[in-house]
Amino acid sequence: MKLTFLSSGLLALTLSSALGLGLAQGISTTTTVTDCVIQEVLPGNAMTGAFVTFNHQGEAVEIVDSLIPSVSDQVELHQMDMVDNVMTMGPLQDTTLTTGQRFFRKGGDHIMIMNIAEDSIPQIGDTHTMTFTFSNGTTATCDALVKSLDDVMKEHAASKMAH
């Protein structure tokens, strides 16, 4: 009788530990994207920028891929830096998302869409799906509205005033 009770107790302890471990390992992370915008392609160019707000909860993740297949196969994460009083652009060095919001905006971190084919140039008012893949295997998508340079600049100025 005691052996049965002890076995039942160990079984219950093992199950509760396994459930607890499963919950601990299953700490969910959630990443959504909002405020998705593609800036119009300026005449004579085959590239443009796109902007987004990442909303992340949970353990930190890395952005490992970004896609806008209806516009271009070459999409990269970039950053703007001030070097010797000159703005420079290059590949994004820190792709980490931690809990909270991370803004990709004009003049800062952004998505660079390059090698846009003539027949794929996004038109003002169109929407294109942007998809981001993260280091934990999850993805987030949004429909990015194509806006004029003037509209993007107005929003950029308004966001600087808000901060």
Image (tube, helix red, strand yellow):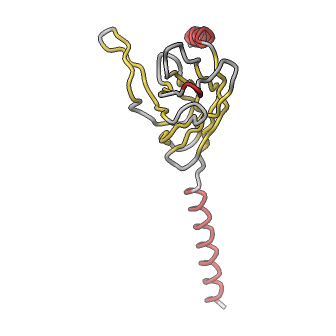
Outermost right residue: 125
Front in this rendered view, residue 94 or 121: 121
Q: Pick out the residue farthest to the front.
A: 119
Q: Is residue 107 left or right of residue 14?
A: left
Q: Residue at x 48, y 34 (%)?
A: 74
Q: Residue at x 52, y 22 (%)?
A: 49
Q: Quadrant of the N terminus?
A: bottom right
Residue 51 is situated, as x and y percent measured from the top left of the image, at: 56, 24
Please state the horizontal and vertical placement of residue 98, each as a whole percent of the image: 51, 36
In this picture, is 56 found above or below 152? below
Q: Is residue 41 above or below residue 137?
A: above
Question: At 63% from the left edge and 78% from the top edge, which residue is drawn?
Answer: 9
Q: Is 91 above or below relative to 135?
A: above
Residue drawn at x 49%, y 39% as measured from the top left: 63
> Hey, which quadrant is residue 50 in on the image?
top right
Q: Nearer the viewer, residue 54 or 144?
A: 144
**Residue 163 screen position, x and y as percent:** 56, 13
Displayed quadrant of residue 37: top right
Residue 103 in percent (x, y) is at 54, 25
Query: Residue reaching furthest left?
Result: 84
Q: Give the number of callouts.
A: 0
Residue 142 lies in quadrant:
top right
